[in-house]
Image: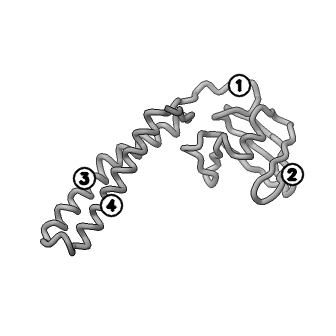
Amino acid sequence: MKQIPITREGYEALKKELERLKREERPKVIAEIERARAFGDLSENAEYHAAKEKQAFIEAKIRELEDKLARAVIVEDVPQDGKVCFGCKVKLRDLDNGRVIEYQIVGGEEANPSAGKISVHSPVARALIGKEEGDEVEVVVPAGRRRYLILEVSP
């Protein structure tokens, strides 16, 4: 069973989503199925078939989240030695356009680049791991080569 590294925050978010699906979405779709059954002939009942599809999707999502939570390994002890590592936050200056960006390096399950959370397996994170404040890093990304200066590393 392959373990999944995750931050405490990411673990709690997965748990919260699982509970929401079990407590809210599952009962709601069961009620939809019961309402649709009341319409009669199930072979031509579009509402019933739609509700059953929705139920299958919700149940699959529940199983997926349960699996991820079972394999999750919470990484909490972020070293405070100033080096970029899993779980830490990094402030960078893009040396090509001067823009300052901030990322937190997280597991693939909680990555969300638009929220500033990048996967430890991403090209940017791989280039940053082990570096420290003041280091320049060059990364090859789909948009081309990017050069960054590490301004700050925090746990």
Going by the numbered disc 2, the residue's amino acid type is Leu
Which residue is depicted at the point 80% across and 51% down?
Answer: 140
Going by the numbered disc 1, the residue's amino acid type is Gln
Q: Which callout, 2 or 3, points to the residue nearer the camera?
A: 3
* Secondary element at tag 4: helix
Q: Which callout, 4 or 2, points to the residue nearer the camera?
A: 4
Q: Earlier along the polypeptide chain: callout 4 or callout 3?
A: 3
Which residue is depicted at the point 24% across and 52% down?
Answer: 27
Residue bearing mark 1: 80
Going by the numbered disc 4, the residue's amino acid type is Lys
From the top left corner, tell me how far across and down residue 35 is, in percent: 17, 65
Q: Earlier along the polypeptide chain: callout 4 or callout 1?
A: 4
Crowdedness near tag 2: few (<14), some (14–19) or many (≥20) residues, C-alpha within 10 Å:
some
Horizontal placement of 98 versus 123: left or right? right
From the top left corner, tell me how far across and down residue 134 is, in percent: 86, 36
Q: Which mark is residue 127?
A: none
Crowdedness near tag 1: few (<14), some (14–19) or many (≥20) residues, C-alpha within 10 Å:
few
Distance between the alpha carbons at the discs numbered 4 and 1: 46 Å
Q: Earlier along the polypeptide chain: callout 1 or callout 3?
A: 3
Q: Earlier along the polypeptide chain: callout 2 or callout 1?
A: 1
The image shows residue 78, relative to residue 90, as above or below, that is: above
Q: Are marks 4 and 1 in contact (CB under 8 Å)?
A: no
From the top left corner, tell me how far across and down residue 133 is, in percent: 82, 35
Name the one closer to the observer, 100 or 136.
Answer: 136
Going by the numbered disc 3, the residue's amino acid type is Pro
Residue bearing mark 4: 54
* Secondary element at tag 3: helix
Q: Which mark is residue 27?
A: 3
Horizontal placement of 149 versus 101: left or right? right
From the top left corner, tell me how far across and down residue 152 is, in percent: 77, 37
* Secondary element at tag 2: loop
